[in-house]
């Protein structure tokens, strides 16, 4: 199938129907009226603004959450913004179908209305980047900028978003570290079309810096600080936010996710297929068969989940996994990889190892025999010999990896995430076994099926 036929077929699947558009337009009008009515009832000075893909008409068919931002005047103190914003969000949500309070930089309300998710988020009514006080304030500016520059290329954004979702590179959340929807929109505005974006995957990486609004010319000091900071952080891509020269839109994008995009783009251009957009993933498998196939072993730590938001919990889990990897490697267990995650009440760290037991003894190198330390070494060890001028001794060690790990944790000899140290100290350690809830995750981890760069071919 030629590339244009593939693209046209995909568009038929991802472009919203007229019925869907009519429903959403009506829904947004109702939400706007409810918001204005509630603001008036509470006597507040605030304005509702729709932001996100729905407001920019870059949403995919069937994927249409509503982001309604409640903008307060700039002179509003931050604590008052949080308090009044939450009060307003709750009051609006009570007129909808259901709601709950969620927490980011400040509390906001998650609701549902007529089967659609609605986020009610307080922010400042900013007019430019110098007004920005909280992380969410830019969203209104983002929506305005995209709507002014997209020039009817909405379907091109849809194609890029669906492609990124299909190859597993979409989402800037910390547990994905991929391309955000806003980044996808900027790339379409920069390069003109979905095809041009994928054709430029290599050039993009070589240039590293994209400056759609020309901040390097207009605000060189702020823009150069951003580039320097992000370059030192070894980011794969630096996209200076068109509405704020201090921000890199792709700051959360990892090298791994860019690599997936890089190879996905190359493979799609060589052999176009619907599978890149809607992959036929064979994610079902038996982790036990994978262990037998590879001859490796899996070690899983399961412990109580600390009460932390995603943006704090996941880095702590990852730091702990790296700490465990480091000490096990030092103890002569080879670690092939690790994975982390959590459910409602518990979290886990999963490691793949080359073996479960090591040698019973290790050879310990000592000091030169004629020194004071040499004499101490001689007295402390049972089997001691000289090689050249240096002493050596045989030391009996713990063989089993589970006992080694539990001992290291108990002696605080592993660098763990500070906020989860107490939880990890009380961990259960499972060897070559995971509970039913983790069987699929263990299979994907061991098989690498989810991240296989050639799975669309």
Image (tube, rainbow, N blue to C red):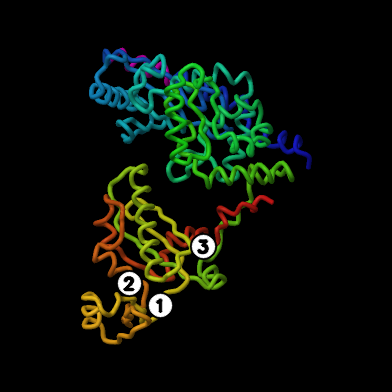
Quadrant in the picture for the N terminus: top right
Seen from the viewer's position, the closer of residues 11 and 354 is 354
Seen from the viewer's position, the closer of residues 261 and 105 is 261
Q: Say which residue appears at 52% left-offset and 24% top-offset.
A: 24
Nearer the viewer's eye, disc 1 or disc 3? Answer: 1
Q: Earlier in the sequence, mark 1 or mark 2?
A: 1
* Label 2 crowd bin: few (<14), some (14–19), many (20+), radius 10 Å: some
Circle 3: element type:
helix
Seen from the viewer's position, the closer of residues 179 and 46 is 179
Q: Decide: marks 1, 2 in contact (CB < 8 A)?
A: yes
Residue labelled with disc 3: 446
Q: Earlier in the sequence, mark 2 or mark 3?
A: 2
Nearer the viewer's eye, disc 2 or disc 3? Answer: 2
Q: Say which residue appears at 42% left-offset and 26% top-offset.
A: 246
Residue labelled with disc 1: 358
Circle 1: element type:
loop
Residue labelled with disc 2: 404
How far from the left and from the top, in percent, is residue 148?
55, 16
Q: Say which residue appears at 63% left-offset and 38% top-offset.
A: 201
Predominant secondary structure, magenta span: helix
């Amino acid at each position: 199938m030629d590339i244009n036929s593939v693209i046209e077929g995909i568009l038929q699947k991802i472009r919203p129907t007229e019925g869907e558009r009519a429903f959403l337009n009506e829904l947004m009008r109702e939400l706007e009226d409810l918001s204005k009515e509630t603001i008036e009832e509470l006597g507040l000075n605030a304005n509702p603004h729709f932001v996100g893909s729905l407001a920019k008409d870059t949403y995919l068919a069937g994927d249409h959450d509503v982001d309604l931002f409640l903008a307060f005047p700039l002179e509003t103190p931050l604590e008052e913004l949080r308090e009044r914003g939450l009060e307003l969000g709750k009051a609006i949500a009570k007129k909808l179908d259901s709601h709950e309070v969620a927490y980011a930089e400040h509390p906001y309300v998650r609701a549902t209305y007529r089967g659609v998710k609605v986020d009610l988020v307080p922010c400042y009514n900013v007019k430019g980047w110098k007004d920005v006080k909280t992380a969410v304030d830019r969203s209104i500016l983002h929506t305005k900028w995209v709507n002014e520059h997209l020039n009817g290329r909405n379907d091109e954004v849809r194609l890029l978003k669906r492609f990124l979702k299909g190859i597993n590179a979409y989402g800037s959340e910390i547990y994905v570290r991929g391309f955000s929807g806003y980044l996808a929109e900027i790339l379409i505005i920069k390069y003109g079309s979905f095809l041009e974006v994928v054709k430029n995957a290599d050039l993009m990486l070589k240039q590293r810096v994209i400056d759609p609004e020309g901040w390097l010319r207009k605000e060189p000091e702020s823009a150069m600080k951003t580039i320097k900071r992000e370059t030192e952080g070894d980011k794969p891509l630096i996209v200076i936010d068109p509405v704020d020269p201090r921000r890199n839109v792709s700051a959360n994008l990892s090298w791994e996710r860019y690599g997936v995009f890089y190879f996905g783009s190359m493979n799609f251009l060589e052999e176009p297929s619907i599978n890149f957009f809607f992959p036929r993933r064979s994610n079902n498998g038996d982790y036990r068969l994978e262990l037998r196939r590879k001859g490796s072993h899996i070690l899983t730590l399961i412990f109580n989940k600390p009460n932390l938001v995603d943006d704090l919990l996941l880095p702590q889990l990852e730091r702990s996994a790296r700490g465990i990897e480091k000490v096990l490697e030092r103890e002569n267990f080879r670690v092939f990889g690790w994975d982390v995650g959590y459910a409602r009440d518990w979290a886990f760290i999963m490691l793949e190892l080359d073996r479960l037991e090591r040698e019973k003894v290790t050879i310990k190198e000592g000091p030169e025999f004629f020194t004071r330390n040499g004499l101490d070494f001689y007295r402390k060890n049972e089997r001691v010999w000289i090689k050249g001028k240096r002493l050596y001794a045989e030391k009996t060690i713990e063989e089993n990896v589970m006992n080694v790990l539990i001992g290291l944790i108990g002696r605080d000899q592993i660098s763990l995430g500070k906020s989860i140290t107490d939880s990890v100290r009380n961990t259960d350690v499972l060897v070559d076994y995971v509970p039913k809830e983790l069987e699929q995750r263990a299979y994907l981890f061991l098989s690498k099926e989810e991240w296989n760069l050639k799975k669309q071919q």
